[in-house]
């Protein structure tokens, strides 16, 4: 069996090929998630199908085809491997490998989303502020930014181990996770393992993920600090999958805003 050591530098490099299968096994429903999100932009006065949308930290692109029902969609992610899968699956979508901290697209968007905790990987407050400000610069004057946190701290139970198993390419894919909380950091060690009928093809990858764990008020504070004055920010404790949602409605008068 090929085993690799714990990768705590840049997650989502070597597990991109397994990502969709594991989350499908966990009952993921991206179409319904986007339908939930659409309620926040449905009253923006734009004609259906004409919006420009950006998904930041889009990963393998699970939400892209559903966002595309609302207009022209662009995806960015810092992981080349995740974007490679998105490119294969959605060849017509404009995709970029980019870290949100340096994001500089030459366009602005009516809707910017960052889903399933992608911004939580900015684990210090100033990086998170900077990343959110960068996203804010890509929102139109009356646009909307929707950020789904990894988890709201007030929803976090005691960390527990998790085991997911599903069939994958004729064999079995297993993902084990152990988590711990250290201050405002949620650290999760994932072990991904394929169990092929031919054991020579089996493989194991370990990754450590470090995520910022803030409560609702913490997210509200950092969003308000990061985004231009006059932006209306609210926190929802439900969100598309029950992990919360930050909703920022921009109210700029022509100016490009700070950050
Ligand atoms: C949990 S995955 C979510 C992917 C996708 N949004 C989804 O719902 O399946 C987090 C993603 O955020 C990306 N990511 C983390 N930090 C990032 C950053 N600073 N800039 C761009 N992408 C980032 C990771 O590479 C990963 O693909």
Image (spheres, grey):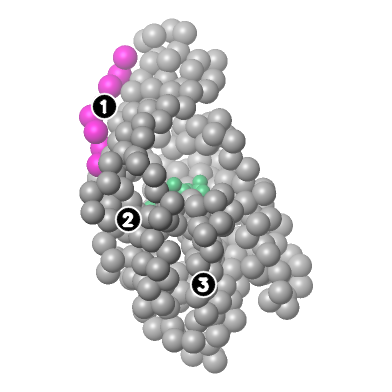
| Left or right: 79, with 237 as reference point | left
Residue drawn at (59%, 81%) of the image: 142
Image coordinates for residue 64, horizontal then vertical, percent: 60, 52
Q: How far apart are marks 3 and 2 (CA)?
A: 19 Å
At a point 68% along the width and 64% down the height, the residue shown is 39
* Residue drawn 36% across the image and 78% down it: 225
The picture places residue 176, in percent across and down from the top left corner, at 38, 28
- Quadrant for the N terminus, please: top left
Residue that label 2 marks: 212
Q: What stretch is highlighted in magenta?
A: 1-8
- Tell me if 34 is positioned left or right of 84 in this view: right
Residue denoted by label 3: 234
Q: Main secondary structure of the magenta part?
A: loop
Is residue 95 among the parts visible in the rendering?
no
In this view, the residue in front, 24 or 219, is: 219
User: For residue 257, which quarter of the picture?
Assistant: bottom left
3D distance between C-alphas at marks 1 and 3? 42 Å
In this rendering, does residue 111 appear at all? yes
Among numbered discs 3 and 2, the one appearing first in the sequence: 2
Q: Which mark is residue 4?
A: 1
Q: Check contact, mark 3 vs mark 2: CB within 8 A.
A: no
Label 2 neighbour load within 10 Å: few <14, some 14-19, many 20+: many
């Amino acid at each position: 069996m090929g085993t690799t050591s714990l990768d705590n530098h840049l997650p989502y490099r070597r597990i991109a090929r397994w990502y969709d299968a594991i989350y499908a096994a966990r009952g993921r429903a991206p179409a319904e998630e986007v339908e939930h999100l659409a309620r926040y932009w449905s009253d923006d006065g734009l004609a259906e199908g004409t919006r420009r949308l950006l998904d930041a930290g889009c990963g393998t692109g699970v939400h892209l085809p559903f966002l595309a029902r609302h207009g022209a969609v662009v995806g960015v992610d810092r992981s080349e491997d995740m974007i490679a899968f998105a490119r294969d699956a959605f060849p017509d979508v404009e995709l970029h490998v980019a870290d949100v901290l340096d994001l500089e697209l030459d366009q602005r968007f009516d809707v910017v989303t960052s889903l399933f905790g992608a911004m939580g990987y900015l684990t210090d407050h100033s990086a998170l502020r900077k990343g959110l400000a960068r996203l804010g610069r890509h929102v139109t004057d009356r646009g909307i930014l929707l950020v789904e946190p990894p988890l709201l701290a007030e929803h976090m139970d005691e960390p527990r181990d998790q085991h997911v198993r599903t069939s994958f390419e004729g064999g079995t894919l297993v993902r084990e996770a152990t988590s711990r909380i250290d201050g405002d950091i949620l650290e999760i060690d994932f072990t991904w393992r394929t169990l092929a009928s031919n054991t020579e093809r089996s493989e194991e990858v370990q990754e450590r993920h470090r995520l910022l764990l803030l409560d609702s008020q913490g997210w509200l504070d950092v969003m308000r600090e990061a985004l231009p004055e006059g932006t209306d920010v609210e926190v929802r404790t439900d969100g598309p999958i029950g992990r919360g949602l930050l909703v920022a409605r921009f109210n700029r008068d022509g100016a490009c805003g700070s950050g």
